[in-house]
Structures are given as structure tokens and as C-alpha cells.
Image (cartoon, rainbow, N blue to C red):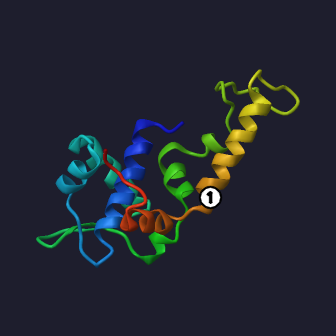
Amino acid sequence: MFSKTCEYAMRAVFFIAHKTTAGTRVGIKEISNGIDSPEPFLAKILQDLSRRGIIQSAKGPNGGFFVDGATLNRPLSDIVEVVDGDGIFTGCGLGLKQCSETNPCPLHHEFKAIRNQLSAMLHDVTIGEFNEDLISGAAVLKK
């Protein structure tokens, strides 16, 4: 459902949130190892997320990536929209441009229901809520 870039972006944000709850910062090598992501690819993703205000970064000897309270209150959909756009919330299951209520593709009605459920979940669950699951051990980022 998500692009590989979006998967890495979500995992990176969750990892950063989990590791920086005590006010610390985390470096790219630790993030890369923590989510099993290629470091050069991850660097581009993190740069974009930082530029778009999803995560924060600081340079220098005590630098690294971190999240603030505002980030923890953001819905997961913000990450998806920054990386993949809003197509997952509005697009056709077969990728057709002309698919609509009046001109549906063969999957339209079934996919619309699934798409709406996914959209509701991504808009309703915050990064902080997911972070609470990581802290409690109810969720993991790595096998």
C-alpha cells in the first residue's frame, strides 16, 4: 500500500520518537541500524522529513534527529502525505485516472471501503500513540 520510501519514513519517525522521548537526539547510523534501512537512502528521507517539519534536526557534536510534542500529536497521515502525497486517500485501486463514482473501475466499490478505513486509521492515530505502543512493547519496528 505504501511506497518503500514511505515505509522507511514511517519507521524512521517512529524510531526517532521512541529514542528521543527523554530529550536526547539520535544519529543517522543508529536510525539506519534500528530500522534496517540503507543509510544513504535514509539520509535523503530524513532531510525531506526535517525540511517539511515532521521531525527536527540539530547540527553539531550533540546534534541528531528528534521529535517535539507537536510532532507526537501529528497524525500518521502527515507522514504519508509528505512522502507519497494524498493518492492513497483518493486514488483508484487499479491506478486509473478516470475512475470515479460515475465511471468506476472493477475494484472501485470494494477498494473505496478499504481506502476509507485506511484513511480514517491514518488520520486518527497519532505518532505519539504509536510511540506509546513501542514504549510498552505492544509494537516493534524490527523483527
Give the x, y percent position of residue 61: 11, 71
Asked which quadrant contains residue 71, the reply is bottom left
Establish if 60 lies above or below 117: below
Residue drawn at point x = 81 percent, y = 26 percent: 104
Residue drawn at point x = 29 percent, y = 48 percent: 35
Asked which quadrant contains residue 51, the reply is bottom left
Asked which quadrant contains residue 60, the reply is bottom left
- Which quarter of the figure is the N terminus placed in? top right
- Name the residue nearer the viewer: 139 or 129: 139
Give the x, y percent position of residue 137: 37, 62
In the picture of the structure, the residue carrying the numbered disc 1 is: 123
Direction from residue 107 to residue 78 in the image, left or right:
left
Kind of residue at badge 1: His
Farthest right residue? 102
Give the x, y percent position of residue 85: 56, 45
Residue drawn at point x = 63 percent, y = 47 percent: 118
The reply to whether residue 53 is in sight is: no
Establish if 79 lies above or below 103: below
- Name the residue nearer the viewer: 130 or 63: 130
